[in-house]
Image (cartoon, grey):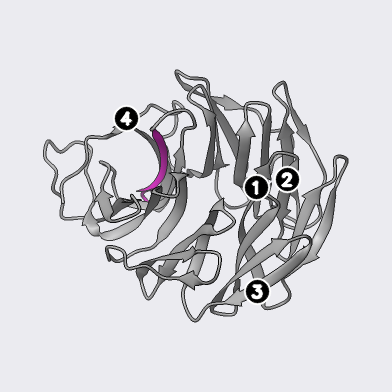
């Protein structure tokens, strides 16, 4: 499979090619506004990293009091974005963008992810689902325990979807009206979840060293057959039910070496992007080196996509950013 020319590399911050840095999530409010969050540094010196796209370039945004890498960011417009992440020594960062400034709010627990839908903002810690009541985050439901850890969340139309892990088995919770229904799956791990509609939800991850995609149709979770490779899916986004995009690590794919003038390499571990059009799957590969993490995000008001990739850089990683034109 050849590399796709549709994925165009977009310059990031000046030091993105250095080691000890990565991005964990990206959220676009439109073609002229997107946010990406992650980390810089190593071990006890890890600091939160936030950047904004202004329509022409990425620029860094200071994060007040941030220790540890930001885990998630979500927005539903230019005046409503939330970022959340865990730090060291039990500290966490949760901040809200109202179109003018970022304001920090307290939250208990080690924050894992955040999801926004209008006035509803949901944050998950290792064990609990917390919602914003306009003044503070309050616990809506405790789902985790000593054996169960929450990992990712999405919300929309009053519904909330949470993924987690219990022992070595993945778990999905569906919340509505404050009640949560639990589904324990036989194998694998789940990295992200996306609600297109209450009867159209995707959860992605990996099982048996292969990518895993699960789809909720309003009645049950099903596992569609997708193109196989060695690796897992890290993220999912969608323009609609028949326009869904997935990105993940692909250890079977040759990794591109930047100073080569051809599309072959004897190294492995690139990124694959999958597209579901409601009938069939197609697969693309951006020109990127051996990679560890990839996040894909639609750009509202366009047919474009963002793709942020953490590529191997020695014993650490660095950042490469793409846009699909």
How far apart in space, not on screen, are marks 3 and 1 (Cα)? 19 Å
State which tag comes first along the sequence, 4 or 2: 2
Span colored in magenta: 304-314
Q: Nearer the viewer, mark 3 or mark 1?
A: 3
Query: Residue 115: which numbered mark, if any?
Result: 1
Labels 3 and 2: the sequence-earlier one: 2
Circles 3 and 2 in contact, beta carbons < 8 Å = no
Q: Residues within 10 Å of mark 1 (few under 14, many from 20)?
A: many
Write down the residue under mark 3.
182
Left or right of residue 61: residue 5: left
Farthest residue in the top direction? 56
Residue 208's quadrant in the figure? bottom left
Q: Which residue is mark 2?
A: 121
Q: Which comes sooner in the sequence, label 4 or label 1?
A: 1
Residue at 56% in and 52% down = 197
The image shows residue 296 at horizontal and vertical percentages of 43, 44
Visible in this render: residue 111?
no
311 inside magenta stretch? yes
Distance from label 4 to label 1 (Cα)?
A: 27 Å
Looking at the rendered structure, the secondary structure element under dot 1 is strand
Residue at disc 2, secondary structure:
strand
Q: Does 315 lie within the magenta span?
A: no
Dot 1 and dot 2 residues touching (CB under 8 Å): yes
């Amino acid at each position: 499979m050849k590399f796709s020319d549709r994925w165009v590399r977009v310059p990031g911050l000046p030091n993105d090619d250095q080691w000890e840095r990565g991005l964990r999530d990206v959220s676009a409010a439109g073609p002229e506004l997107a946010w990406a969050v992650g980390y810089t540094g190593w071990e006890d010196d890890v600091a939160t990293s936030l950047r904004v796209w202004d329509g022409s370039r990425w620029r860094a945004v200071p994060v007040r009091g941030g220790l540890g890498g930001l885990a998630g960011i979500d927005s539903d417009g230019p005046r409503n974005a939330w970022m959340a992440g865990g730090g060291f020594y039990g500290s966490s960062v949760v901040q809200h963008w109202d179109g003018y400034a970022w304001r920090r709010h307290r939250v208990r627990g080690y924050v894992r992810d955040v999801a926004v839908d209008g006035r509803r903002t949901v944050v998950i810690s290792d064990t609990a689902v917390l919602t914003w009541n306009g003044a503070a985050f309050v616990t809506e439901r405790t789902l985790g325990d000593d054996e169960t850890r929450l990992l990712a969340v999405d919300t929309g139309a009053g519904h909330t979807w949470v993924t987690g892990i219990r022992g070595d088995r993945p778990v999905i919770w569906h919340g509505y009206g404050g009640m949560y229904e639990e589904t324990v799956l036989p194998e694998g791990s789940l990295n992200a979840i996306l609600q297109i509609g209450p009867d159209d939800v995707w959860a992605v991850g990996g099982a048996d060293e292969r990518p895993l995609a699960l789809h909720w149709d309003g009645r049950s979770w099903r596992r569609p057959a997708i193109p196989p490779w060695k690796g897992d899916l890290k993220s999912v986004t969608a323009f609609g039910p028949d326009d869904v995009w997935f990105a993940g690590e692909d250890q079977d794919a040759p990794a591109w070496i930047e100073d080569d003038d051809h599309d072959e390499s004897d190294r492995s571990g690139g990124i694959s992007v999958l597209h579901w059009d409601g009938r069939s799957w197609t697969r693309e590969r951006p020109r990127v080196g051996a990679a560890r993490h990839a996040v894909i995000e639609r750009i509202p008001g366009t047919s474009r996509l963002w793709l942020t990739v953490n590529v191997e850089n020695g014993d650490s990683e660095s950042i490469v950013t793409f846009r699909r034109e």
